[in-house]
Image: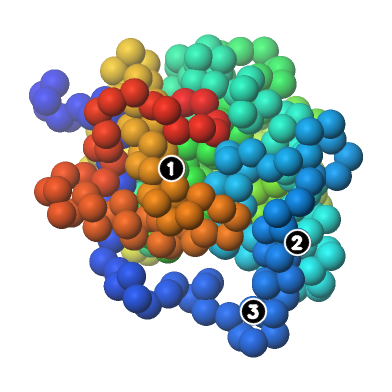
């Protein structure tokens, strides 16, 4: 780096993706038997008198209907290996309850988790060559004592990543760098995070790349491997050549990973633009969802294609969004 202007302080907007709205992505192209199973699950949640069992107010909120997209239902069906409608329904209802109880719609806000973010130990930045948003974990920058808020911060970031995914993109790229004497979390904390990821965010991990793994951390990974879902393990790779293997373009990869993006984490410059970009993106998604009927089972594909096409028509980035206030319901920014 030779000049101050070489430094980057903010996360890039979602990239434009080539797509044909009339051609569904592979994950939405179902066989007759798969379609029949999906239809049974959708019918269950789309009933006019449906209530979530085991809670005081079981009627689904708009936030929950928005979350129960076609793709969301299919992710949970795949997670139960297409076993039966009942298996998928049980798991979806478990996550609907968890999202309420865990505080995704009230407690876990940007202001609440911000103390965890001030050192840049977890940064959302860039996209891999499959258009997945990337999140970088740098344990050496740990700045707080182990607590539930650390886990809440992970959940908050996962929700932001889903908002930054373009049409047809449902997975993320997890990047972990154990350089500079990184302190690994306790086994208990790691298990809590893994349980949340595997139970409540199935089919969301596209790849997990880990570099600079010291001996103690390597031993730690061996301890937690039995708790990692068998479908997830092949996505975990150590010390990859991100550029040589075509996983990232140089400008979309942090310089410490071999890319050309010299990202300097300064909290005051990074945090507010990220929160604002995600809030505006969420408002756009919410607006299109309402236009498409505001009900269970609307395809994320249709919502995001509409957002992307409108952005192109206006000659603006899809993430620029409306400049007014954020009145979209759901997870707070």
- Residue that appears at 79% across and 69% down: 85
Task: Say which element carries label 3.
Answer: helix
- Residue that appears at 70% across and 85% down: 33
Query: Disc 2 marks which residue?
Result: 44
Task: Say which element carries label 1.
Answer: helix
Q: Tag 3 or tag 1, which sits nearer the N-term?
A: 3
Query: Disc 3 marks which residue?
Result: 35
- Residue that appears at 22% across and 49% down: 311
Where residue 229 sits in the image (x, y, percent)?
74, 57
Q: Quadrant of residue 16?
A: bottom left
- Residue that appears at 34% across and 33% down: 280
CA distance separating discs 1 and 3: 26 Å
Q: Nearer the viewer, residue 278 or 180?
A: 278
Query: Disc 1 marks which residue?
Result: 286
Relative placement, left or right, of 222 versus 152 is right
Residue at the far front in the pictured view: 48
Q: Quadrant of residue 168?
A: bottom left
Residue 261 shows in the view: yes
Q: Quadrant of residue 116?
A: top right
Relative placement, left or right, of 21 versus 105 is left
């Amino acid at each position: 780096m030779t000049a101050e202007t070489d430094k980057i302080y903010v996360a890039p907007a979602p990239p434009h993706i080539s797509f044909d709205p009339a051609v569904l992505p592979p994950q939405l192209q179902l066989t007759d038997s798969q379609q029949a199973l999906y239809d049974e699950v959708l019918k269950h949640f789309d009933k006019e008198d449906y209530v979530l069992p085991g809670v005081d107010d079981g009627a689904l909120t708009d936030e929950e209907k928005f979350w129960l997209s076609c793709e969301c239902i299919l992710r949970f069906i795949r997670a139960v290996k297409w076993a039966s409608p009942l298996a998928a329904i049980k798991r979806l209802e478990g996550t609907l309850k968890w999202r309420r109880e865990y505080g995704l719609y009230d407690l876990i806000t940007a202001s609440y988790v911000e103390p965890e973010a001030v050192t840049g130990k977890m940064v959302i930045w860039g996209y891999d060559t499959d258009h997945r948003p990337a999140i970088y974990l740098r344990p050496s920058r740990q700045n707080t004592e182990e607590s539930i808020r650390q886990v809440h911060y992970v959940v908050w970031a996962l929700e932001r990543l889903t908002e930054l995914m373009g049409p047809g993109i449902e997975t993320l790229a997890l990047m972990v760098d154990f350089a500079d004497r990184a302190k690994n979390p306790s086994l208990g904390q790691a298990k809590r995070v893994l349980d949340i990821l595997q139970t409540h965010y199935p089919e969301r991990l596209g790849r997990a790349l880990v570099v600079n793994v010291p001996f103690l951390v390597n031993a730690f990974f061996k301890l937690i491997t039995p708790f990692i879902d068998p479908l997830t393990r092949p996505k975990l790779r150590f010390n990859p050549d991100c550029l040589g293997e075509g996983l990232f373009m140089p400008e979309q990869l942090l310089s410490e990973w071999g890319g050309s993006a010299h990202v300097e984490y300064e909290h005051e410059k990074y945090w507010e633009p990220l929160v604002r970009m995600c809030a505006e993106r969420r408002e756009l998604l919410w607006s299109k969802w309402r236009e498409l009927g505001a009900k269970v089972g609307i395809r994320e594909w249709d919502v995001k294609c509409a957002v992307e096409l409108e952005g192109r028509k206006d000659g603006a980035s899809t993430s620029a969004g409306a400049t007014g206030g954020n009145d979209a319901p759901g997870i707070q920014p």
